[in-house]
Image: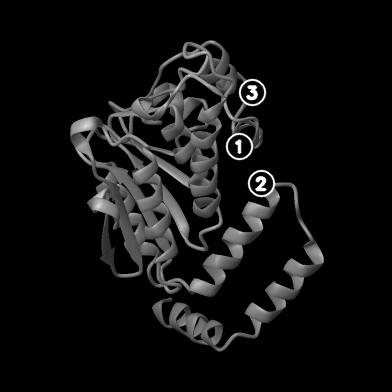
Amino acid sequence: MTDGLVRATAGTGYVHLELHEPARRNPLSDAMLAALREALVRVDPGVNTVIVSGAGEAFSAGADLTELTGTVADLGVDEAIAETLALLRRTPALTVAAVDGPCMGGAVDLAVSCDLVVAGETSAFAVPATRLGILYNPAAVAHWHRRLPRQTLVRLLLAGDRLDARQAYDGGLVGQLVPAGRAVATATALAERQAGASPAVVAAVKGLLVDLDEGDVDLSRWHEVRERLLAAPDRVAALRAVRERR
């Protein structure tokens, strides 16, 4: 990976991608985003789960402020984040953000772009866009609006509130709340349970959910996918395995 900024660890049926610049709280620099894109492109098609976490005491501080100019040129930062997170959302596997510690600005965008957010009890979420004089990327806000309650968006984007883990869970941003320091372990246990599922079925369910998120659904196509999967040879084996366990 680029300068070791994203460290990939493979497990049975999953891969763990760790943002790794702990001394700077894992900022989403141009180099970090490039490394994350490279890591996502390299994910094996047989992988059912991708875990994303941050090294050290933070998930991520968000955009690298040292790369911002305070001019319209900063649109390039938006574009790099958007390109990376579009790739993350379209990854065929289940994607899990394992958050311990602060998750700030663009890192909240990263978390919301994952299918599931597992957060430690001492994690915190904030988007200080208004304080920095920024209207956050409208395309990203539109995606958040489809995923999160409006009151959660108002608190994050307009009021500039810092949500603790419980508030983020109650506000729909976090899907599972765990003891501090246990986010990665919990996400890994989930990935190990998911390892025996059919990658084709996981990819189909993920693809349908993404289409529904984006309001771009051709249900006739998805019915065709469903029929094809119903006739797949590995489905017979899966049914047999379930019957034998029962």
- Name the residue beneath numbered marker 3: 150
Front-lying residue, 7 or 4: 4
Q: Quadrant of the C terminus?
A: bottom left
Q: Quadrant of residue 50?
A: bottom left
Q: Percent position (x, y) of residue 191?
A: 35, 59
- Name the residue beneath numbered marker 1: 147
Q: Percent position (x, y) of residue 42?
A: 39, 66
Q: Residues within 10 Å of mark 1 (few under 14, many from 20)?
A: some
Element class at badge 3: helix
Question: Are the two marked residues, 1 and 3, in contact with CB atoms closer than 8 angstroms?
Answer: no
Marks 1 and 3 sit apart, C-alpha to C-alpha, by 9 Å
Mark 2 or mark 3: whose residue is earlier in sequence: 3
Which residue is pictured at 75% across the width and 52% down the height?
A: 216
Which residue is pictured at 50% across the width and 18% down the height?
A: 129
Q: Is residue 178 left or right of residue 22?
A: right
Which residue is pictured at 33% across the width and 34% down the height?
A: 27
Front-lying residue, 90 or 199: 90
Q: Residues within 10 Å of mark 3 (few under 14, many from 20)?
A: few
Which residue is pictured at 23% across the width and 52% down the height?
A: 4
- Name the residue beneath numbered marker 2: 213
Q: Is residue 84 left or right of residue 189?
A: right
Asked which colour scheme the image uses, the reply is: one colour
Q: Percent position (x, y) of residue 123?
A: 31, 28
Element class at badge 1: helix
Element class at badge 2: helix
